[in-house]
Image: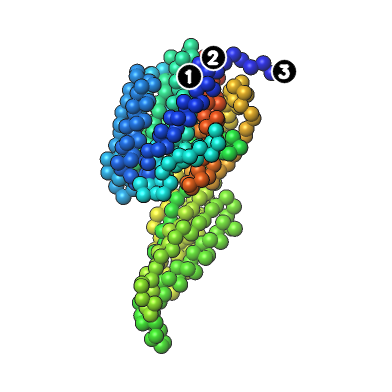
Amino acid sequence: MYLAMSVPASITALTARTPELGALLERWAAINSGSGHAAGLERMRTSLRNDWVRAFPAAMVEEIPANAPGYNPAGVCSLSLRLRPNAPCRVLLCGHYDTVYEADDAFQTCRWLDAQTVNGPGTADMKGGLVTMLAALQAFEQTPHAAQVGWEVLLTPDEETGSHGSVELLRAAARRSDFGFVFEPGRPSGDIVQSRKGTGTVMAICHGRAAHAAKVPNDGRSALLALAGFVLEAAKIPAEMPGVLVNIGNFHGGTAATNVVPHWAKAEIDVRVTTPANREPLLARFRELADRVNAIDGLKLELQGGFNRPPKECVPAEIRAFAEWQRAARDVGVAPFNWVHTAGASDGNFLSEAGLPNLDALGPLGDHLHSDREFCRVETIAPRAQIVALFLHRVAAGETTLPSRR
Ligand SMILES: [Zn+2]
């Protein structure tokens, strides 16, 4: 029989906090913090700041501008808390406080589906993760060797739109840390994430030649038809390149008048790859398809954009940490779970690119993210926080070793 190592009392006690943690989640989820809603983001940041400062009065708190003109509304900031930055081991806990639901979205309030399940904007992605992070650190701070581990919490306002304003902060925090934890929601099964695809957006803009639709013979060149042919071919790329995803996200073109050969069309295409080595061949394939259109007199197809988040590939330090993570889970009584590949990207991708090994999808269990069916299973917040706290306690006690990067 397996005998669990002793679990500090403050960690065991977390389960009794479930009702209070559920209420905190409901309070945070009730604040609209859509990535484009500056006033909402500010309200959310103020609320987070108050709650985190109350929990950790000794932490150094900073609000750092996350400017990204064209992506982020002016004035949005990341919130950073650091405690014991000179401790022998330093960890980074990351989360975003923006959601995909903007100020005018119909989905604004929480509703309890049953005693343990709350449906509401951002409950899983990822305000539930932020509650987990807070509860875990509160329990960890009361463990006997906590002084051995310094932590940094980075809460960002723009993950859902690509982290354009916070990517440099993430990279800088990654460089001064030994290990990272990302609190995106756990899979509905409880699995966490091992690797993530890299993501990007390709814009295809086609210029043709306008003419009267009734002109015979017609010397117009339809940008709309040319681009339609292009996107149909682009959609076939995944069949040739395993691990690649291509989604034609939108398609616009033409004019209000139907008796005009359309001179303009534009499509935005979501692209994803599993390994960095796929990026260039994928973009080259897009260029090849564009060249076919450009070979026709009177048509011009330009490509813009490219990759944003690089793929997150699993590294040996993460394999070792995952084994310890599972051991901590077993010792707090959490049922076994696995870790999986996912096509969705997160800020864990940027941490990996900066060389910081990290575990991702550590937040509570939930599902239907980015829809009005989004929910969080509140009874999983405390157990997930217990895993984090016990893992950190074991690092602090020297029982679990993290790779030193400095
Ligand atoms: Zn998220």
Decide if ligand 1 comes within 8 Å of the CB at mark 1.
no
Decide if ligand 1 comes within 8 Å of the CB at mark 3.
no
Among numbered discs 1 and 3, the one appearing first in the sequence:
3
Task: Tell me the element at label 1.
Answer: helix
Residue marked by disc 1: 139
Residue marked by disc 2: 8
| Residue 229 appears anywhere in the view | yes
Q: Farthest residue toward the left?
A: 75
Number of numbered markers: 3
- The amino acid type, in three-letter code, at marker 1 is Ala
Percent coordinates x, y for residue 139 in the rendering = 48, 19
Residue 1 badge = 3
- The amino acid type, in three-letter code, at marker 2 is Pro
Q: CA distance from mark 1 to mark 3?
A: 28 Å
- The amino acid type, in three-letter code, at marker 3 is Met
Is the residue marked by circle 3 packed among few (<14), some (14-19), or many (20+) residues within 10 Å? few
